[in-house]
Image (cartoon, helix red, strand yellow):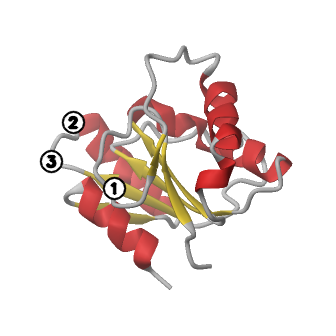
Amino acid sequence: MAIGSVVLTPGSAYSVPGALDLSADAISDEEWTARVALAITAASGEFVPPLLLVLTGAAAAHAPHLGFAQRSARRAVGGYVLVDPVLPRPGAVSDWPDAPVTVVITSNADDDTRSAALGARLRGWEVLEGDASALIADIAARP
């Protein structure tokens, strides 16, 4: 599935041409999914589905819930990019992932994040290392 638009969720401070950047002040963990889903809804005229959702660090643990919110809103998700992530807990939403997941490990990743990459590989997810902006743009350009 070709990607229509890239959505950089709060905390994803990367420069990706044409991406919808949902930068925001600090959002509590309890409100993260709801606030980001509302921001995507508010910006729905600015993007073309399917979406490539980019989540960074601890926010990546919310990927199943954000994906569920997008399906509930009938917005197609073409993929997820988790940058230096805290991986989602298995079983968080039973039918997730509903699209390909790519884990990006940057030079800023700590040892815990690097070891989490093994868990991502065991789940069958693609793991890439390098500059997040360039890798996100490459993923979005895939046919």
Mark 3 and mark 2: span between their CA atoms?
Answer: 8 Å
Q: Secondary structure at mark 1?
A: strand
Vertical placement of 136 versus 63: above or below? Answer: below
Whether label 1 touches label 2, CB < 8 Å = no
Which one is nearer the viewer's eye here, 28 or 22? 22
The image's mark for residue 104 is 1
Label 2 packing within 10 angstroms: few (<14), some (14-19), many (20+): few
Q: Residue at x 57, y 78 (%)?
A: 2
Label 3 packing within 10 angstroms: few (<14), some (14-19), many (20+): few
Q: Nearer the viewer, mark 3 or mark 2?
A: 3
| x then y, percent, for residue 27 | 51, 17
Residue of label 2: 110
Q: Residue at x 35, y 66 (%)?
A: 137
Q: Residue at x 34, y 61 (%)?
A: 17
Q: Does 104 sit left or right of 140 as displayed?
A: left
Question: For residue 86, which quarter of the picture?
Answer: top left
The image's mark for residue 107 is 3
Label 1 packing within 10 angstroms: few (<14), some (14-19), many (20+): many
Q: Secondary structure at mark 2?
A: loop
Which one is nearer the viewer's eye here, 108 or 135? 135
